[in-house]
Image (tube, grey):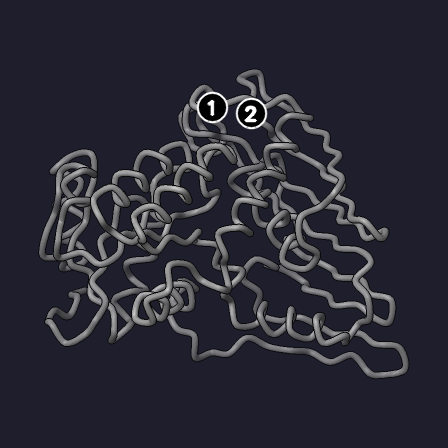
Amino acid sequence: MTAKRGRDGRVRWGVLATGGIAAAFTADLLTMPDAEVVAVGSRTPQAARAFADRFGIPRAHGSWAALAADEEVDVVYVATPHSAHREAAGLCLEGGRAVLCEKAFTLDSRQAVELVDLARERGLFLMEAMWTYVHPLVRRLVGLVRDGAIGTVRAVQADFALGGEFPPRHRLVDPAQGGGALLDLGVYPVSFAHLLLGEPSGVRATALLSDRGVDLQTGMLLSWEGGAHALLHCGVTGASGTGATVVGSHGRVEIPRGFHAPESFVLHRAGAEPSEFLASAEEGGTGYVPEAAEVMRCLRAGEKESPLVPLEGTLAVMRTLDRVREQVGVRYERA
């Protein structure tokens, strides 16, 4: 697979890290005619070169700092575990690069504020890679809800959990990598609730912790002034249906599975037949295309943040995750 190259107005991407999510994102970028992947950076020259050869990327940097200093890069996609997001994204911003940083954005809200402040000081674009917020079908769902299709939102339910045996150094269970269900999976239902209702006034949480202090499963009850609430769950002890329901005063919306990047949802309203909405087959790739397209639209327009994934929203989600971690007793060394 080879990236097209040229100086014809395409946005030039750098990719920081070489794991599975970096590969998936890069593969999607290569399907976009207005994107050009020009560089990759890793902690070792060998990893960077292997990734570059795999995707036909012209430059391979053996350090994050070298990628951050690459003047031929317009924007860097940060795909490290979230324990390294503060360092990696910070290096890129200090090097003058715009940044798209994977979620969870950082280990805690303090680190998130540092990155946002740095981006604003440097006048650079920064966005959390919360693909749910830019997903066309989710945007349609939110539009219907905001137009009053189900009345006033009263409740949100969402869960995201995986099952399996994870070795001790796997990022999902390793405290050194910010492991645990909450930051890796729980960020999705929390962000979904924020998207519909904003930052909650109340947070209650409980969790099952591992002997290394990471959360293996977490339940959350968020509440808002006016009575709305959200019942959320995440875990790595057993796979869930990954569905979501939004309950309103005059109807509800049900996402049967994969609410974070759904293929369909059903609108139920009193006195009417259910209406099913399907994702378009034209999105292409594995789901990262709308996310990358929004970044490139913002860069071309000279916008420093996306209206679809605003930085204040990212900070609000991080504050909620902090409150959950505080209640369940999860601590990270770097936070």
For this orientation, the residue located farthest to the front is 121
| Residue bearing the label numbered 1 | 175
Left or right: 251 with respect to 30?
right
| Residue bearing the label numbered 2 | 214
Residue at point 46%, 30% (across, down):
178
For this orientation, the residue located farthest to the right is 271
Residue 209, position as x, y percentages in the image: 62, 23
Whether pointer 1 and pointer 2 mark residues with C-beta atoms closer than 8 Å, the reply is yes
Residue 235, position as x, y percentages in the image: 62, 38
For this orientation, the residue located farthest to the top is 211
Quadrant (top left, top right, bottom left, bottom right) of the N terminus: bottom left
Closer-to-camera residue (89/30)? 89
| Residue 239, quarter of the rendered image | top right
- How many residues crowd around disc 1 within 10 Å: few (fewer than 14), some, or many (20 or more)? many
Q: Is residue 219 above or below residue 6?
A: above
SS at mark 2 in the image? loop
Left or right: 295 with respect to 219?
left
The amino acid marked with disc number 1 is Pro
Closer-to-camera residue (160/249)? 249
Label disc, if present, on residue 126 of the rendered structure: none
Q: Is residue 19 above or below residue 7?
A: above
Left or right: 70 with respect to 205?
left
| Residue 270, quarter of the rendered image | bottom right
Residue at point 63%, 21% (across, down):
329
Closer-to-camera residue (123/33)? 123
Residue at point 72%, 76% (across, down):
147
Closer-to-camera residue (271/35)? 35
